[in-house]
Amino acid sequence: MSRRSLKHYLYVTIFGTHTRAGRLFDILLIIAILSSLLVLTLESVPSIASEWGKQLRALEYTFTCLFTLEYLLRLYCSPKPSAYAKSFYGVVDLLAILPTYLAFLFPAASSMSVIRLLRVMRIFRILKLVRYLQDSNILLRSLLMARRKIFIFFSTVAILVTIFGSLIFIIEGPENGFTSIPKSIYWAIVTITTVGYGDLVPQTHLGKAIASITMLLGYSILAVPTGIITAELSQEMRTHKTLVKCPNCSKSGHESDAIHCKYCGGELAEPNQRVVVNEGKN
C-alpha cells in the first residue's frame, strides 16, 4: 500500500463514518472515552484510589497513549493538519492528552494541587463525544443564531442583579451580612435564579420586600432564554427537514453534505444534481 493510499484509508476511517472500519473506529473510541472518564471518577474516590491506585494509573497512561496515537494519526492523514489542530475538535483532542504529560513536569510533593487540577482537566475528554452526536450540530447552530438575543437577555439580567444587589446593600448593610456590593450582587444572582442558598438572608422588612420582588422577577424571566433557544431550534429543525434523496434506493433522510446513502451505501449525486425533498410535505 502506497503512502498516499494509506493516508486516504486512515482519513476515511478516522474522519469518516460511512465505512465499516470508520463506524468501528468511532465505537471503539467512544468506549475508550467513557472508560477513561470512569477511571478518572474512580481515581477521585480515596478508598478506591488507595487500593487500586496503581492499576487506575496504569489504565490512565494506556488511555493517554491511545488518545495520543489518535491525535497524531489525525494530524498525519488530515489534508490540512494545521487547520485541524486549530479547530474546536483539534483543541479538544489536545486537551484530552495534555494534562497527563504536563503532570510529569511538576513534582507531586510540592505541587499536589497542580497535579490534582491537571488530572481533573482530563474531564475535557467528554467534549470529544460531541463529534459523535448527530444532532449536536443542529443545537449548536440554534445557539449561534440566537447569540444576540441571549446576549441581550443576559445583559438585562446583569443590570437587574446589579441594581437589586446595590439596593439590598444600602438597605441591609454589613450588620446583616451584606458587607460589600459584590457580595450583595452574589445574593441577587442566587435569589433571581431561584436557588436561594440561605447563607445571606435579609432581616429588615424593606429588604424582605426587595427579596420577594427579586424572586418573583426570577420566576418571570426563567422562561425567556428557553423560549429564545426553542424558537431558533424549531426553525433550524424545519430547515433541516430539507434533505437529499438517494438516486439508488429513493430514500430521503440524508444531510446536504452526505456523500453516501446511509441505507443502501450507494454514492449520492453531485450537489448540483441532487434531488431534494421536503419531508414536512410528504
Image: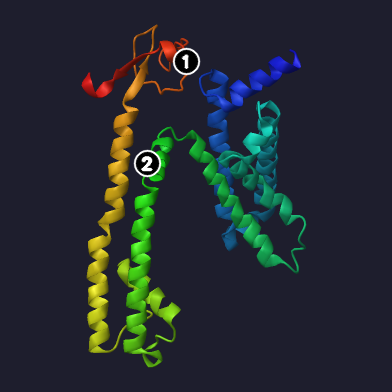
Is 149 placed left or right of 217 in the picture?
right
Residue named by callout 2: 142
In the picture, residue 218 is in which quadrant?
Answer: bottom left
Which mark lies nearer to you, 1 or 2? 2
In the picture, residue 278 is in which quadrant?
Answer: top left
x and y percentages locating residue 100 in the rendered image: 69, 51
Label 1 with label 2: CB-CB less than 8 Å = no
SS of the residue at dot 2? helix
Residue 223 visible? The answer is: yes
Q: Who is closer to the viewer here, 120 or 84?
A: 84
x and y percentages locating residue 11 in the rendered image: 63, 23
Quadrant location of the C terminus in the rendered image: top left
Q: Which residue: 74% across, 64% down?
A: 108
Quadrant location of the N terminus in the rendered image: top right
x and y percentages locating residue 224 in the rendered image: 27, 55
SS of the residue at dot 1? loop
Q: Is residue 279 above or below residue 274?
A: below
Residue named by callout 1: 260
In the picture, residue 70 is in which quadrant?
Answer: top right
Q: Amino acid at mark 2?
A: Ser
Q: Is residue 47 above or below residue 248?
A: below
Q: Which numbered marker is on residue 196?
A: none
Mark 2, Cα crowd under 10 Å, few <14 / some 14-19 / many 20+, is many
Q: Amino acid at mark 1?
A: His
x and y percentages locating residue 267 in the rendered image: 47, 10
Q: Which residue: 33% across, 35% down?
A: 236
Q: Which residue: 59% across, 56% down?
A: 120
Residue 190 visible? The answer is: no
